[in-house]
Amino acid sequence: MQGGSNKGKEALISSKVLVDAGVSNTENDDRAVDALARVIEKEDFASMDVVGQFNLGFIIARRRKDASPSPSRSISQELQVMDDLFIVDQHASDEKYNFETLQLTTRIQSQKLFRPQPLELTAADELLATENIEVLRQNGFEIEVDDSECSGQGSRLKLVAQPISKSTVFGMKDLEEIIHLMRDRPTGQMVRCSKARAMFAMRACRKSVMIGMPLNSHQMLTVLRHMGTIDQPWNCPHGRPTMRHLLDITTIDSTSIMQSAPIDWSAFQ
């Protein structure tokens, strides 16, 4: 009895997750993103097949894989295959790939200051900035270390150059934000301030595949493969889901499909 209860509970949870990740969930994007992370793994994008393009804006993709083994499943159940269709927003998914690429690789230009500006930091933040000085350079903040000052006093670092962009103005608050973000990250891991992320999001949007653009099979496959290489493929830089679960093909009764009335395709012309 306990085994049957567990299986029923698993099926109920799985069904709810699929609903949250599906196209019917139009009210809660955050729940959809969380559900997608549970329904599909990043490794799945490497083996996905392209079914086609829908409405010049979406890629229909098919994911086939063996179901994950579970202690509560019998041997016959473990041999079952997961076979699902997903609908992928071609613009949002390409935009997220370009956004994460820009975040990792872009070195923001900097402009020398007329006079170096001493940084008044705590001893902990001073050490953090020193250990991540290359990350600060990537963000356009050039830091100079004054070895004549005593270590741990919070007065060894001076700002000699700050980032510059055509449409974005950076300042000390952005440097403070970056240092704050560094506190929760491993040494050397790239972090960006909110202004830089907004700037990269705008650039990524402009260079990405647009809605209304016809794509061939190779282009659609490239979009899918790219999704498996980024950190968070489930949502675009603006927070919207990049894809939704469309259909569990294993639930389709092939007999009922064969017995269904023929489709009059002329009605769609």
Image (cartoon, helix red, strand yellow):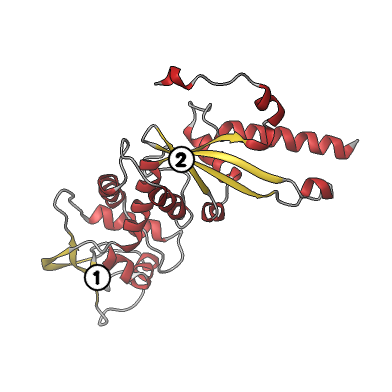
- What is the x, y in percent for residue 42? 53, 53
What residue would you read off at disc 2? Answer: 52
- What is the x, y in percent for residue 139? 27, 62
Examine the image and state in which quarter residue 53 appears: top left
Do the numbered discs 1 and 2 sit on residues whose CB atoms are within 8 Å?
no
Q: Amino acid at mark 2?
A: Gly
Q: Is 158 placed left or right of 83 in the picture?
A: left
What residue would you read off at disc 1? Answer: 143
Examine the image and state in which quarter residue 261 appears: top right
Q: Amino acid at mark 1?
A: Ile
Q: Can you say whether 54 is above or below 66 in the image?
A: above
Which residue is at 55% across, 54% downward? 47
Q: Number of numbered discs present?
A: 2
Determine if residue 253 is in view.
Answer: no
- What is the x, y in percent for residue 191? 37, 59
Determine if residue 213 is in view.
Answer: yes
Q: Is 237 placed left or right of 48 in the picture?
A: left
